[in-house]
Structures are given as C-alpha cells and as structure tokens.
C-alpha cells in the first residue's frame, strides 16, 4: 500500500496513524538519507510496529534504518508492562550484538609500522568465521549455565579481563532474570564452544586511530585523544542467541494467536509481557544477552594478551582499558517519562544503541556528567564515531540512537558488485590491513554496501540526541 510520510521538522519524518496503528511512526533522518530509506520496505515496517498492543509515543526508527525481520533494523519501540507485548522480532536473531571500545596508550606512528604482525596475531588469537569455536576449552553444560546467569562476571572470575571492566559495560555485563532452564537443548549445545569467538557477517575486531576530537571535555572523560590507538570489538551471542530467537519466534506466533493479537505481519509475532510466554522469552533472551556480554569480555582479554605478546610490552605501558560496552539488539525494562509521568516500559532496540544522558541513575559515576558513551562503528573501510548520550535523547527517543551506517545493499548484491575486484588490495592501498576467513565476507561488508556513517551520525548530532566526541579511522581489521 502507499505509505504517507510527512516531513514535520529538520531530520524528522512522521507516518500518520491509520486504522490499526496505536501510535504514529517517526523516522529520524536527513533528506538525503530519507531517499535511501524509501527504497526498501523499512518505513512500512515502522508503520507495522505501531500496531503492537501497548506501544507508547511512537514507533521509531533511527537514520541507519533498513529492512529487517518484522521490525526494521534501526527500530525502537516501547511498550507498557501491563497491556504491552514483547516481540522477538524487535530484538532480532543476534541477541545483544554490540560493540566494545577499548582505549590504549599506543600511538599512531608506533602501531602503523607494526600493523601487519599486530593484525596477524589478533587473527590467530580470535577464532572467526561461520561456526567458529575453540577460543577456550569446551564448557560443560553446568559451567555454561553459570555463565548465562553471570554474564561478563563469569569471564572476570575465570581470568579474562579485570574487575574494573564491569563498571564500563552496560548493566555491568549482566541482565538480571536470566534463566538457563528456559533454553532449548539445541541452544545450549550451540553455546558450549563458541565463547570468545567472533563469528562472521558484519562482526569484526578493529585497530582504530583516533583521528579527530570534537568535544575535548567529554573525550578527556572517556580517556580519548587525537593520535591514540583504540580497539573496537563488534560481535554478539553467536549460535546460542540465534537459536533462542528461532525457538521463541515460534512461541510468539502461537501466543499471538492464543491472545488474539492482530498484526499486519506475522514476523511481528509477540506475547503479552505479563504472560507466561512473554516472561519465558525475557528469561531466555537475558541468557543470550549475558552470553554476548561475556563473549566480548573474553575477546577483549584475548586481544590484550595478543598485544602484550606482539609488542613485547607490559600492562602499564599498554594502558588497555575498557571505555564502554553496549548492546544494540535487546529489550530491557526501563523507566521513562510518558505524558509527564515516569513509568516502567519494555524498550525494544533492534539495531539501535542506548544513549542515556547525564545524571542517569544507571551510569557509573565516571560518566554521570558526560552522558554514556555511544559507539557507532562504520565498516572496515570507513570511519567510526564515539558520541555521548544527552538529556534530549531521554525526552524523544527513550534514550536511544543509531548503531551504525545501515545497509543499502543486500549481501548477495554486494558480492555480485564486488565481482573480480581485488578487495584486500583496495583496502591495503587505503592503509587498512584486513584479514578474514573468506573473501566473500569482506565483499559483503565493503564501504559501498552502507549509507554514509558520517551523515547518519551528524543527523543525530544535529537533533541533539547524541553529541559527537571522536572520529576513528581503521588501521587493521579482522573478520570472519
């Protein structure tokens, strides 16, 4: 059907309510980005999400929005706890896919001359690719279940990283209420030997250079400065998370029929939050989220050990410290203001990053005055950004922002367009050393596959949803 989309202010578009929608749709995008967004069905998905029972304010989309399963990737929706629903499609298959940023004391000139051996050592230290496993010894089911409850704390207790890391992870790396007994035997089996592995697709580890600082005061709080080397880790809950979603999509489809929930797309299948089905999905999803927090913690530790060995340096000189670790495929119970009153909501963020502003109760003391770090990676050939959450984000987007550039081309189209191009050589000519399990993975993630990340970030900056703090450029990348 023809979808009406009205520009109501600079960088803000609205989809008016029609019959069946409980709230309007709202898309945050520049005029140029909006032209890309209109080329697939993502805007229609924004309208579809507005049908969810209990949704409040708007069905929202960030400027990196593109088509996804049920919800658009880049979608945000908050539902009430008494009348609202939870939808596995509003979280996605890679539960708690997210990003960790680690600062170091290393500087550009020192690392550039050593980038090939550094990338080679990282590639050898971190299993990557489809089905990758074996970063640590295969866990027993009992140990895995403990990990699913403890999250990143499990890694710390097993000598992967440092206790102070937990203060710099969203929710300290552990969602309460995780229940491993709610996972299928297949999900458990898939999680036994994938801890500390990168996977494939858009997942990566990147050695990045801080090229520009936009806000010196906040950058200083984050521990960032121009010419500095930092590490980005982008991965999620691997096969375990995928299986949890796959299992509970089926549960949600049955629940939608059981509770007579009418939806325009079966992929929006959902269950009332206070139902048995809704609570079981939340308990299982939290397990997968904790698995992902732990996964990034283990990988971060493997990287630290690799750098210490490759550079023959010591921890004090390396200065390896977690800046922040965020989720961008998750549903959380949070308190937000609606119609002048604070209430608890279930906030779905699918391909969207939490962007809580200054003085938020959930932030560590270090970030109380700055707002939380918001990490927005580009692709392996373009820049990434570190931003900070704002009070405005809390008012207009449930404390949410974009999570990346957003695809404009399918993986199949990307491979076809790459053709016989010497893509590793192209990247090396740009000063970027890339190692990957397959050329196909790199072809799927080339820069032309994505929107312009700088324009995506600038859109949210201009709206004052996030503030730009630093711009990073890639020097070395490992992929699946």
Image: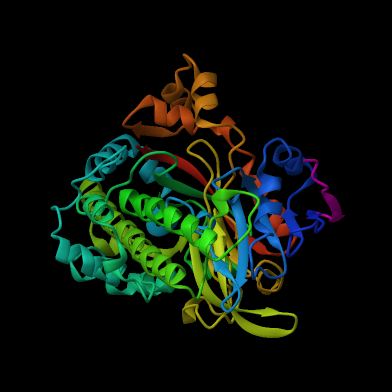
User: Which residue sits at x=76%, y=38%?
Assistant: 35
The residue segment tinted magenta is 1-10
Say if the magenta span includes residue 144.
no
Front residue (pair 387, 266): 266
Front residue (pair 35, 365): 35
Rendered view: 222 above or below 439: below
User: Which residue sits at x=82%, y=57%?
Assistant: 16
User: Which residue sits at x=29%, y=71%?
Assistant: 149
Front residue (pair 47, 421): 47
**x and y percentages locating residue 243 in the rendered image:** 34, 51
**x and y percentages locating residue 39 in the rendered image:** 71, 35
Residue 97, can we see it?
no
Residue 236, can we see it?
yes
Q: In terms of image quadrants, where is residue 116?
A: top left
**x and y percentages locating residue 334 in the rendered image:** 54, 76
Along the horizontal axis of the image, is 261 left or right of 366? right
């Amino acid at each position: 059907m023809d979808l009406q989309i009205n520009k109501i202010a600079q960088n803000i578009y609205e989809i008016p309510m029609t019959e069946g929608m409980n709230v309007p749709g709202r898309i945050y995008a520049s005029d140029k980005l909006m032209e890309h967004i209109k080329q697939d069905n993502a805007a229609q998905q924004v309208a579809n999400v507005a049908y969810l029972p209990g949704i409040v304010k708007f069905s929202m989309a960030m400027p990196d929005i593109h088509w996804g399963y049920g919800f658009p990737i880049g979608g945000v929706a908050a539902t009430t706890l008494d009348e609202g629903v939870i939808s596995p499609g509003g979280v996605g298959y890679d539960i708690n896919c997210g990003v960790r940023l680690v600062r170091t004391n290393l500087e550009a000139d020192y690392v550039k001359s050593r980038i090939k051996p550094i990338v080679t050592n990282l590639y050898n230290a971190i299993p990557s690719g489809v089905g990758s496993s074996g970063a640590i010894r295969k866990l027993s089911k009992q140990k895995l279940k403990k990990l699913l409850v403890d999250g990143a704390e499990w890694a710390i207790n097993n000598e992967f990283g440092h206790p102070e890391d937990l203060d710099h992870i969203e929710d300290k790396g552990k969602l309460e209420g995780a229940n491993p007994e709610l996972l299928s035997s297949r999900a458990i089996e898939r999680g036994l030997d994938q801890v500390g592995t990168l996977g494939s697709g858009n997942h990566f580890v990147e050695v990045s250079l801080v090229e520009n600082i936009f806000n010196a005061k906040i950058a200083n709080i984050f521990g960032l400065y121009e010419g500095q080397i930092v590490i980005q880790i982008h991965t999620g809950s691997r096969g375990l998370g995928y299986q949890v979603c796959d299992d509970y999509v089926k549960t949600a489809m049955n629940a939608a029929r059981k509770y007579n929930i009418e939806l325009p797309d079966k992929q929006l299948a959902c269950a009332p939050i206070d139902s048995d089905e809704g609570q079981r999905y939340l308990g299982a999803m939290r397990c997968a989220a904790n698995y992902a927090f732990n996964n990034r913690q283990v990988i971060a530790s493997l990287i630290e050990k690799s750098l210490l060995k490759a550079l023959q340096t010591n921890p004090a000189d390396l200065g390896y410290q977690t800046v922040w670790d965020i989720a961008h495929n998750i549903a959380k119970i949070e308190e937000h203001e609606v119609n002048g009153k604070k209430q608890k909501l279930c906030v779905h963020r699918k391909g969207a990053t939490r962007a809580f502003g200054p003085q938020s109760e959930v932030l560590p003391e270090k970030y109380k005055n700055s707002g939380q770090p918001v990490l927005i990676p580009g692709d392996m050939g373009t820049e990434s950004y570190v931003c900070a959450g704002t009070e405005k984000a809390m008012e207009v987007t449930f404390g949410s922002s974009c999570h990346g550039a957003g695809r404009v081309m399918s993986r199949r189209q990307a491979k076809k367009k790459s053709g016989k191009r010497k893509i590793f050589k192209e990247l090396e000519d740009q000063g970027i050393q890339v190692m990957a399990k397959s050329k196909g993975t790199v072809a799927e993630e080339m820069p032309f596959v994505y929107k312009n990340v700088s324009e995506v970030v600038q859109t949210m900056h201009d709206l004052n949803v996030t503030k730009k703090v630093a711009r990073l450029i890639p020097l070395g990348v490992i992929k699946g």
